[in-house]
Image (cartoon, rainbow, N blue to C red):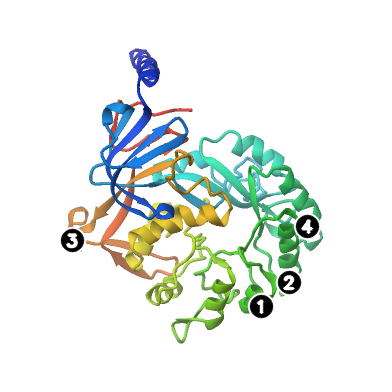
């Protein structure tokens, strides 16, 4: 009871102070990385309500109702995971669509610095209203959606193989009815040597004027990805699981030569977006390491988080980002691929940056040093589903997450006064 009274009093106090002070939150002394604005230096960030007001040196801490001590930490736009699975539910035979394989966003976002997720096709046009009601509307995390071209959504089994349920017009109609939430069309898990599912997804994307995300389920023989990139997809369409290496899908890196295939560079010039979409078995170091070494970085980093990937090699957004640090991407490039680049890919340019007037979603990250964290090797170990392992000297950890101008996660109590918002 005493604790509840104290929290209530603190909230009342903060509300009173807000009337007298210029900013609701000032983040002091952090190293700001804001790729959109080419900021990569120690600066302060001021927020008011749900809006970024100012990024500058030496903002007076007294101007903030709350102050976050970010000295020695990195301050970035809120992370965007644009391949996630969040239509969780109790229908046990429906896998990712109102079923047990998807995850409630708030349990797995803020503690990893993620403020926005894009659900990658769990709901189709038939089930999107339910998804909006029980997940989008009920989550503190910003939840957007790639709408599945399959009307039933990602229910697994024969449902996702039903070409007759891939209705471009009906899919586009629902996408246009919910433009605030639906940012693209998704094709996933189709198994068969058949371009019809891809073409119907692209048709829906054209009708709704939004991008398409393609996840090849697989086929024997494999569908040629050069044909996919050059003949079926449009500039701005997204190829997810770009570092996958499975017998049922053609990889982007020639395994024998250890080089990115020449047409992949042409596809990038065309405007195809290469997304990590890590997942359970959709990422292999044998693909990613040769690509990174030759400078072929993913456009966007994402997790494909679900109940099967979260406790295996993938784990979470920061673990995936840390793997790319270990493979040779520098921190600004990793941050860009996790903030501004996905915001651009989904055409939500108000996100993923710290420009004045943008949404007040902010991540405060610590870069852990293996020399001080790991007693034996001085490095962190990162592995993929095949058992391949790389060592990394650094690992990312979320210290504070701010969503819509409110502190929603604080690992070590760096916010003063400590009032972490519950809703």
The mark that comes first in sequence, 3 or 4, is 4
Label 2, on which residue?
195
Looking at this view, is 157 or 119 the one in front?
119
| Mark with earlier residue (1, 4) | 4
Please give the residue where the numbered disc 1 appears in the rendered image.
227
The secondary element bearing badge 3 is classed as loop
Q: Which mark is residue 168?
A: 4
Check contact, mark 1 vs mark 3: CB within 8 A: no
> Residue 26 at x, y = what percent?
33, 34
> Circles 2 and 1: CB distance less than 8 Å?
yes
Q: Residues within 10 Å of mark 4 (few under 14, many from 20)?
A: many
- In what element is the residue under mark 1? helix
* Disc 3/disc 2 C-alpha distance (Å): 51 Å
Q: Nearer the viewer, residue 159 or 33?
A: 33
In the depicted structure, whether residue 403 falls above or below residue 156: above
Query: Which marked residue is nearer to the observer: mark 2 or mark 1?
Result: 1
Question: In the picture provided, is 40 more to the left or to the right than 320?
Answer: left
Cα separation between marks 2 and 4: 14 Å
């Amino acid at each position: 009871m005493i604790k509840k009274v104290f929290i209530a009093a603190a909230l009342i106090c903060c509300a009173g102070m807000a009337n007298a002070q210029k900013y609701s939150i000032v983040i002091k002394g952090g190293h700001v990385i804001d790729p959109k604005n080419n900021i990569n230096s120690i600066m302060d960030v001021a927020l008011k309500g749900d809006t970024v007001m100012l990024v500058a040196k030496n903002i007076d801490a007294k101007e903030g109702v709350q102050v976050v001590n970010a000295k020695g930490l990195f301050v970035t736009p809120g992370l965007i995971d644009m391949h996630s699975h969040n239509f969780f539910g109790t229908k046990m035979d429906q896998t990712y669509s109102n079923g047990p394989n998807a995850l409630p966003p708030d349990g797995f976002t803020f503690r990893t610095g993620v403020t926005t997720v894009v659900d990658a096709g769990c709901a189709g046009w038939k089930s999107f209203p339910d998804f909006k009601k029980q997940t989008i509307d009920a989550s503190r995390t910003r939840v957007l959606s790639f709408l599945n071209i399959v009307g039933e959504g990602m229910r697994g089994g024969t449902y996702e193989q039903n070409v007759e349920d891939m209705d471009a017009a009906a899919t586009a109609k629902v996408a246009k009815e919910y433009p605030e939430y639906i940012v693209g069309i998704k094709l996933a898990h189709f198994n068969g040597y058949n371009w019809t599912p891809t073409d119907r997804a692209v048709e829906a994307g054209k009708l709704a004027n939004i991008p398409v995300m393609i996840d090849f389920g697989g086929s024997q023989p494999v569908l040629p990805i050069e044909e996919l990139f050059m003949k079926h997809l449009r500039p701005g369409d997204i190829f997810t699981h770009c570092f996958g290496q499975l017998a049922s899908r053609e990889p982007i890196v020639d395994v024998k030569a250890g080089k990115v295939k020449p047409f992949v560079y042409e596809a990038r010039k065309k405007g195809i977006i290469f997304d990590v979409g890590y997942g359970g078995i959709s990422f292999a170091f044998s693909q990613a390491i040769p690509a990174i070494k030759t400078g072929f970085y993913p456009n966007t980093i994402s997790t494909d988080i679900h109940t099967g990937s979260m406790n295996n090699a993938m784990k979470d957004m920061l673990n995936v980002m840390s793997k790319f640090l270990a493979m040779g991407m520098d921190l600004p490039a990793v941050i860009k691929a996790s903030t501004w680049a996905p915001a651009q890919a989904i055409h939500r340019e108000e996100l993923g940056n710290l420009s004045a007037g943008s949404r007040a979603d902010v991540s405060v990250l610590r870069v852990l040093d293996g020399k001080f964290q790991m007693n034996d090797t001085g490095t962190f170990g990162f592995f993929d589903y095949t058992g391949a392992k790389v060592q990394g000297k650094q690992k990312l950890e979320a210290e504070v997450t701010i969503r819509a101008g409110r502190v929603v996660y604080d690992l070590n109590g760096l916010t003063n006064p400590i009032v972490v918002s519950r809703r």
